[in-house]
Amino acid sequence: MIKTISTPKAPAAIGPYSQAKVVNGMLYTSGQVALSPADGSIVGATIEEQTEAVMQNLKAILEEAGTDFTKVVKTTCFLADMGDFGTFNEIYGKYFTEKPARSCVAVKTLPKNLLCEVEVIAVVD
């Protein structure tokens, strides 16, 4: 059984996809960026502000699915500038205390020219 996860506490999808899906006890999120759940506007101009916004959006989706950051087993992180890697890691580390498996890559451009995007896979109890 596949369950679609949707919460107004995270930004609505800006394309033909959902915020997340739960399949066989695992949550798969779409990539989250620094958009306001209220109106879809960009949150913050710095890597610090945008990373915090991304984490809050992920937190809302995790909670809606009945899980949390401690149950995340894999993340995929996209940075517009690998020069932001250290700053991104500082904020990321506050949320992902269980140190899930991770990929982190620099990309040419992110949606709306944002600075970072993160997707997660988590266990749902």
Image (cartoon, grey):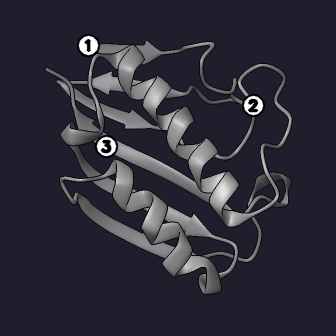
- Mark 3 and mark 2 lie on one chain; the one further toward the N terminus is 2
Q: Which residue is mark 2?
A: 36
The answer to whether residue 31 of the structure is visible from this angle is: no
Q: Position of residue 120 (x, y in %)?
A: 38, 46
> In the image, residue 27 lies at what x, y percent?
31, 31
As drawn, the residue found furthest toward the bottom would be 83
Cβ atoms at labels 3 and 2 below 8 Å apart: no
Above or below: residue 81 compared with residue 29: below
Which residue is identified by label 3?
A: 121
Quadrant of res 116: bottom right
Quadrant the C terminus occupies: top left
Q: Amino acid at mark 3?
A: Ile
The Cα atoms of the two marked residues, 1 and 2, are separated by: 30 Å
Measuring from the top left, give residue 39's x and y in whole percent. 84, 22
Q: Is residue 110 visible?
A: yes
- Residue found 68% across the figure and 53% down from its top: 50
Q: Nearer the viewer, residue 90 or 82?
A: 90
Which quarter of the rendering shows the N terminus? top left
Q: Which mark is residue 1?
A: 1
Callout 1 secondary element? loop
